[in-house]
Structure formats: C-alpha cells, structure tokens
Image: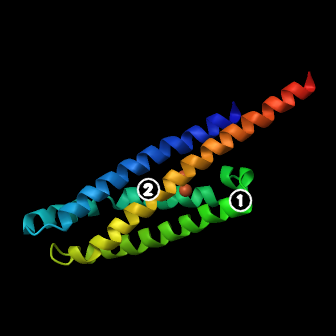
Amino acid sequence: MESHESTEHLRREHLEILHLAERMQDALSLASKDEFAARQKGLWDLRALHHGLLGISQHCGSEDGVLESKYHRHLNGEKYDLINAQHQGISRNIKSFIRELPLLTADSVVDVVPRGFDLVDRIREHIEYEEEMLGYIENNVSWSRNKATVASR
Ligand SMILES: [Fe+2]
Ligand SMILES: [Fe+2]
C-alpha cells in the first residue's frame, strides 16, 4: 500500500488548499463591497492569507521535483506537462498577488479582486485535476501490482 500512503498526504494537503481558497473567496467578496468597513476587513483577511498562499506555492514546487514527484513518475508527458504549467501559473500569480498586498488600501483593494478570483479559480481547477490524476495513479499502481501478483502465482 506504499502508493496510497504517499498519495494520502497529497490529498490531505489538497483539502487544506481548498479550505484556503474558500477563505480567499470570502475575503475577496468583502473586498469588493461598497462599504468601506467591509473592504477594510476584506483587506485584512487577504493579508492574513499571506502565509497560506506561500504554502500553496511551496506545495506546487515540491510536486515539480522530477525525482520525488508522484506525477512525474506515473503520468505521461502531456498530463505531467499540464500539471507543471498549472503550477507555474499559480506560483507566478501568488507571487505577484502577495507582492501587492502590503501596498493596498481599503480603496485600492478593489483593483486586485478580479485577479484574486482568477487565482481562486486556477487553484480549484488545479486541485480538481490533480485529485483526478491521483485516482488514476492509485488505480494504475494497484492494478499493475495485482497483475504482478497473479503472474507470480
Ligand atoms: Fe497537489
Ligand atoms: Fe499541484
């Protein structure tokens, strides 16, 4: 069950990432409100996500390592390339979003709301794809293991 153990921690991290995407969506909704106080709160909430967003970037980076990446080992070029491209897009967006956070005010925060929602969408789309790929990897690995077991009988 080696394969399931090592995909399990990825799935756990994905749940945390989806939770963070949810919090980001809430903060962005506040940041786009007409009331100043709501935008102020939205900005604070977005700033509170700084650390979590860096964590997502690190998660993406750790999945890219050619030697240790489950995706690289088990997926064909096209699927792996797509994951890789998504990682790069997400990391780039996170970096520029984080860079802007300290410069924003309760008024100018509105300007980054569309990009913020775009980032939330990208993150969700990516996690959905990876979860699908993890399912594929788990099935594939246990299938080839069963085949090997049958063959050795
Ligand atoms: Fe992942
Ligand atoms: Fe990923």
Question: Do the residues under discs 2 and 1 have CB atoms within 8 angstroms?
Answer: no
In this rendering, is residue 135 above or below 50?
Answer: above
* Ligand 2 contact, mark 1 (Cβ < 8 Å): no
In this rendering, is residue 25 above or below 6?
Answer: below
Could you tell me which residue is drawn at 43 percent across and 71 percent down? Answer: 93
In this rendering, is residue 114 above or below 152?
Answer: below
Seen in the image, is 151 located left or right of residue 120?
right
Answer with the quadrant where ligand 2 appears in the image: bottom right
Would you name the residue on which mark 1 appears? 66
Q: Residues within 10 Å of mark 2 (few under 14, many from 20)?
A: some
Residue 124, numbered circle: 2
Amino acid found under the numbered disc labelled 2: Arg
Residue positioned most to the right: 152
Of tags 2 and 1, the one toward the viewer is 2
Location of the N terminus (image quadrant): top right
Could you tell me which residue is drawn at 10 percent across and 69 percent down? Answer: 34
Colouring mode (rainbow / by chain / secondary structure / one colour): rainbow
Q: Residues within 10 Å of mark 1 (few under 14, many from 20)?
A: few
Evaluate whether residue 39 shows in this view.
yes
Secondary structure under tag 1 reads loop
- Place of residue 67 in the rendered image (x, y in percent of width and height, measured from the top left): 73, 55
Location of the C terminus (image quadrant): top right
Number of numbered labels in the structure image: 2
The Cα atoms of the two marked residues, 2 and 1, are separated by 23 Å
- Place of residue 145 in the rendered image (x, y in percent of width and height, measured from the top left): 79, 33
Foreground of the two, 131 or 19: 131
Amino acid found under the numbered disc labelled 1: Val
Residue 123, numbered circle: none
- Place of residue 137 in the rendered image (x, y in percent of width and height, measured from the top left): 67, 44
Foreground of the two, 86 or 102: 86
Evaluate whether residue 55 shows in this view.
no
